[in-house]
Image (cartoon, rainbow, N blue to C red):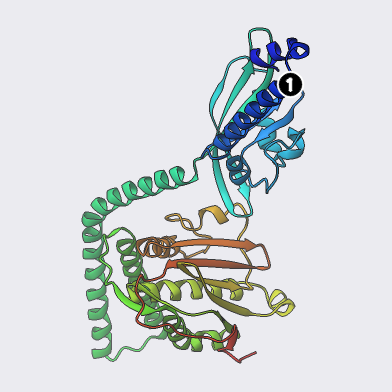
Amino acid sequence: MKSGFLRRLLDRAEKVDKERILDYMKEIAEERDLLVLILDSMIEGMIVIDEEEKVVFVNQSARSILDLGDGSTTPDMPLAKMLNHPGLLSLCRSGIDNSTPLPFLEYELRLPKGRTHVQINIIPLQNREERFGTLFFFIDETEHKEREQKLLEAEKLAALATLTAGMSHEIRNPLNSLSIHLQLLQRHLKKKEIHDAEVEEELSIFNTEIQRLNGVIESFLGAVRPSHPAIKLFDLNSLVTETLTLMEPEFRENGIRVFLHEEGDWPYIEGDRSRLKQSLINLLRNAIEAIVAQTQEERQRKANEIVLSMARRGDKVTLAITDTGKGIPPKDLPHIFEAYFTTKARGTGLGLMIVDRIIREHQGTISAQSELNEGTQIEIALPVAAESPRLLEHDAPKTHDVENSD
């Protein structure tokens, strides 16, 4: 395609002196560079292809959103070579033959950096004579989708909280009554000096189940009840080491070795120490259960270990918990932080939801990666306190073996 100006200039090229032509070409180059700079500065990703599916322009936002790597804005390569996502390529091609725009198409990309929700607008490029290419606009909708999801979760929790106020009362009353009558029955048997092992075992089961139901109600209330964190300044390092010391008997009992890797300087964070400690305990117990749930043969095949890695990354401090357990199936992994989702026979599906909620209350994030039959890694990222009274200095990365049992 040549603009009307360029066509007229070329038609008169023989009559125009070389200096005038050079001035025109310089002006055109400057205008082109300005246009490329503007397009390359756009938040929206943009890819332009010609009628042969060759990419003639791609801006930096498109490279960033689609994880295409660095490169030229005019790569001069086939679209199929640039887009290494078959599903996305197929969706883009579906609009190439259309003579009208296709707006608001949605696609979810699975990239090394995580899931990215992309909105795609496909616009045909044509003049009065013919179509000469296609323009693709890519808009990163990931944050918008996450906000929608959080809003939906908040609405669900609000509805559950309203329902819970009445339900917990109605359930707890008969449970308390059962517990009282059970205690009276046990006292009566003791007073009458009646000793029947089978009856005592049955009563013990009743008592255990009543306590379990009370525990389920407490977990449910903890998941939906509005919380009021007690915010204080403390360092994550001391919280982790304190928690590992507390849980050392559980690691030893299950034959699990635990290692703590520390890297860099440790700033303070602001948060509710008790709630964050409970979250860490829940995650560590999940890791223990994942290892113990394996067969003896599977446990002998690999190390029975939990590794905690702490590091500061800019204004965030990250804590990764990696186990060598049975792993999480790929189809289940996206749902592990959802309410009532569990793979445990007697699980409530509230534990990880509560952990996720606590981390988000602290303006942090939590994510999971897992490989079936190999293990799982949970990573927590929390903001560093704006003002830290001191830094906990570590000269170099260290490894602490906090459990020596085999």
Q: Quadrant of the C terminus?
A: bottom right
Closer-to-camera residue (393/156): 393
Closer-to-camera residue (191/294): 294
Left/right placement of residue 26 relative to residue 317 reads right
The residue type indicated by label 1 comes to Glu
- Give the residue drawn at x 43%, y 67%: 382
Residue denoted by label 1 = 51
Number of labels in the image equals 1
- Give the residue drawn at x 67%, y 33%: 57
Q: Quadrant of residue 371?
A: bottom right
Left/right placement of residue 372 relative to residue 166 reads right
Q: Residue 127 appears at what percent x and percent y?
A: 64, 12
Q: Looking at the picture, does residue 396 appear above or below residue 73?
A: below
Q: Looking at the picture, does residue 171 appear above or below residue 239?
A: above
Residue 94 seen in render: no
Q: Quadrant of the N terminus?
A: top right
Q: Looking at the picture, does residue 218 appear above or below residue 19?
A: below
Residue density around tag 1, few if under 14, some if 14–19, many if 20 or more, within 10 Å: few
Label 1 residue SS: loop
Q: Residue 79 appears at what percent x and percent y?
A: 73, 33
Q: Residue 18 appears at what percent x and percent y?
A: 75, 22
Closer-to-camera residue (138/386): 386
Q: Quadrant of residue 169?
A: bottom left
Residue 380 seen in render: yes
Closer-to-camera residue (11/380): 11
